[in-house]
Image (cartoon, helix red, strand yellow):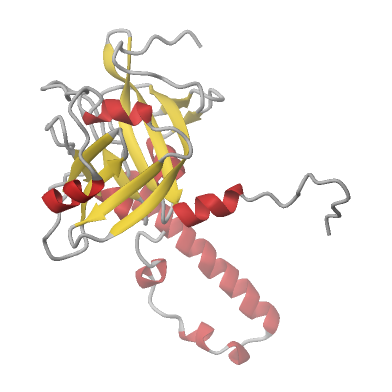
């Protein structure tokens, strides 16, 4: 596509539970007992109720969603710093009570602490070069969003490849393991605007910020890394995402149902 990313960055060619929606609507007594209504009317009313909830959710959730701008200026991450062992990293970052994510570990690539966004600052990304920021708005949708600037730790996100193991370390020293499942790249039509429209670099489709948010962050149970793509004179020209799913799900999706042996019969 003729892209020339920032020299330090690489642009690969590959590519809700926000809350219970029922809590937004008072319980409807008419629906509590199906026998109170004829079958046809019950079904029609139930469909109308579902449609109302979907519309209400769209009105309440979509306008507020955004895609943080993960670039800026500041000290660059040191790419040659040694990666500690997993046990040493756990010892350094954990120990507090609770279940917050304290760090992210990828063997031979990086071991980075994780900080939380300040309350109601959904566009905040830590300026520290060796720190990842958890995206609070993604957490509302059941996804673990991890942000970093592309001049800093986000530069390492371009090194993540399909099948790589991602280990999340929590403050109580517990671990969760994930595998990278895919990457995706988008051009921001307004690079500095977190509510910009975006162009999908795979198929050239245009998406609004809420649509892109839904595509990359409305994925309950997954981990999504985000940083910016630098191009020409713009450090925030685009957005780069890496998705990882729990290891068990990744391995299950990799199992084939056919075995290529002579005489094998597939039922």
Residue 252 image position (x, y, % from top left): 57, 54
Q: Residue placed at 39% from the left, 29% from the top? A: 197
Q: Quadrant of residue 239?
A: top left
- Residue at left 41%, top 71%? 22
Residue extending furthest right?
263
Residue 146 position, x and y percent, is 28, 42
Note whether 57 is above or below 184 in the view shown: below
Residue 12 or residue 63, whichever sits in front: 12
Q: In the displayed structure, would residue 229 be above or below residue 250?
A: above
Q: Residue 123 location, x and y as percent?
A: 21, 38
Quadrant where the C terminus lies?
A: bottom right
Q: Nearer the viewer, residue 255 or 229?
A: 255
Instruction: Answer with left or right where residue 116 lies relative to residue 51.
Output: left
Q: Quadrant of residue 140?
A: bottom left
The residue that appears at 29% across and 51% down in the rendered structure is: 168
Residue 64 visible within the image: no
Numbered disc total? 0
Is residue 37 among what the camera can see? yes
Residue 225: x and y, percent?
Answer: 34, 38
Q: Residue at x 69, y 78 (%)?
A: 40
Q: Nearer the viewer, residue 54 or 158?
A: 158
């Amino acid at each position: 596509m003729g892209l020339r990313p920032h020299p330090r960055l690489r642009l690969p060619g590959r590519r809700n539970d926000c809350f219970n929606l029922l809590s937004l609507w008072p319980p409807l007594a008419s629906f509590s007992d199906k026998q109170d209504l004829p079958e046809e009317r019950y079904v029609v009313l139930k469909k109308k109720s579902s449609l109302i909830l979907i519309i209400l959710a769209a009105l309440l959730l979509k306008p507020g969603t955004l895609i943080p701008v993960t670039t800026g200026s500041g000290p660059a991450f040191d790419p040659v710093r040694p990666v500690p062992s997993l046990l040493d990293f756990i010892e350094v970052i954990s120990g507090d009570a609770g279940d917050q994510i304290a760090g992210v570990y990828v063997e031979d690539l990086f071991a980075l602490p994780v900080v939380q966004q300040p309350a109601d600052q959904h566009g905040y990304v830590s300026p520290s070069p060796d720190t990842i920021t958890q995206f609070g708005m993604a957490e509302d949708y059941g996804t673990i969003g991890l942000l970093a600037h592309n001049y800093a730790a986000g530069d390492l996100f371009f090194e993540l490849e399909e099948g790589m193991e991602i280990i999340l370390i929590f403050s109580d020293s517990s671990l969760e393991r994930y595998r990278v499942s895919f990457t995706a790249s988008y051009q921001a039509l307004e690079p500095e605007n977190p509510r910009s429209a975006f162009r999908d670099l795979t198929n050239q489709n245009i998406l609004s910020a809420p649509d892109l948010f839904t595509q990359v962050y409305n994925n309950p149970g997954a981990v999504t890394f985000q940083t910016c793509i630098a191009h020409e004179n713009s450090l925030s020209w685009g957005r780069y995402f890496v998705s990882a799913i729990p290891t068990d799900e990744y391995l299950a999706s990799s199992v084939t149902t056919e075995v290529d042996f002579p005489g094998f019969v597939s039922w």
